[in-house]
Amino acid sequence: MTDGEYKKQKRRIQKLADRWLPALGLDQWHLDLAYKREGIAASAEDAAENWQCNAQARVKWEYQRATLSFNMLSMEDYDDKELERLFVHECCHALVAEMREWGTEAMTKDFADHALKHEERVVACLTEAFLRKRP
């Protein structure tokens, strides 16, 4: 990826941040955007299924802090609508992340993995609902 391509994709993501962070109330958070030129490591399960990680939310909900990371190697593959969906999806993880904390001490790894699939489903539904009310 050339510096010019990198800057172009970064501008696309920043434009989405300017639109969506206030609309979702995340402008009240300390939220960083991380642009990963080297990609984002996939989980073992995702790697086994040849699934690439294109974006990731790392959230410290109790401090209203989050970092949204984007795999810059794949951003140019997304048209504007798909990139917006990806961005809003990661934002939604910040909104629901605290629900992961319930019962994690007692959860087996398999159960925790299953619970994360439920979070992904909720986040996907919220993403679609928010996109219908696009600011």
Image: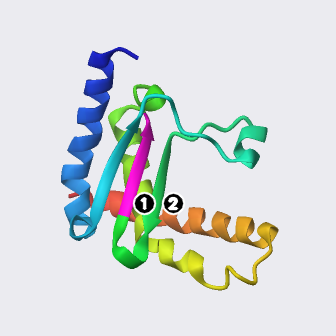
Q: Residue at x 49, y 77 (%)?
A: 98
User: Within 10 Å of the Cα at label 1, are there few (<14), some (14-19), or many (20+) other Cα atoms?
Assistant: many
Q: Is residue 7 above or below residue 81?
A: above
Residue at the image point whose x is 60% and y is 40% from the top: 41
Image quadrant containing the C terminus = bottom left
Q: CA distance from mark 2 to mark 1?
A: 5 Å
Quadrant that contains the N terminus? top left
What is the crowding at mark 2: few (fewer than 14 residues within 10 Å), some, or many (at least 20)? some
Question: Could you say where residue 115 lies in the image, as x and y percent from the top left?
Answer: 68, 71
Classify residue 93 as left or right of residue 115.
left
Residue located 49% across and 50% down the image: 56
Instruction: Check disc 2 and give the amino acid type.
Output: Ala
Q: State the scheme by which the image is colored.
A: rainbow
Q: As rendered, which of 105 and 122 lies closer to the eye?
A: 105
Q: Is residue 121 above or below residue 45?
A: below
Q: Which mark is residue 127?
A: 1
Element at label 2: helix
Q: Are marks 2 and 1 in contact (CB under 8 Å)?
A: yes
**The residue under label 1 is which amino acid type?**
Thr
Above or below: residue 31 compared with residue 122: above
Relative to 32, is 112 on the left or the right? Answer: right
Depth order, front residue of 48/31:
31
Residue 36 is drawn in which quadrant? top left
Q: Main secondary structure of the magenta part?
A: strand
Say whether residue 134 is left or right of residue 54: left
Q: Residue at x 21, y 65 (%)?
A: 27
> Which type of secondary structure does the marked residue at label 1 adopt?
helix
Q: Position of residue 39 (x, y in %)?
A: 52, 33
**Stretch in magenta:** 66-71
Q: Which residue is mark 2?
A: 124
Q: Quadrant of residue 116?
A: bottom right
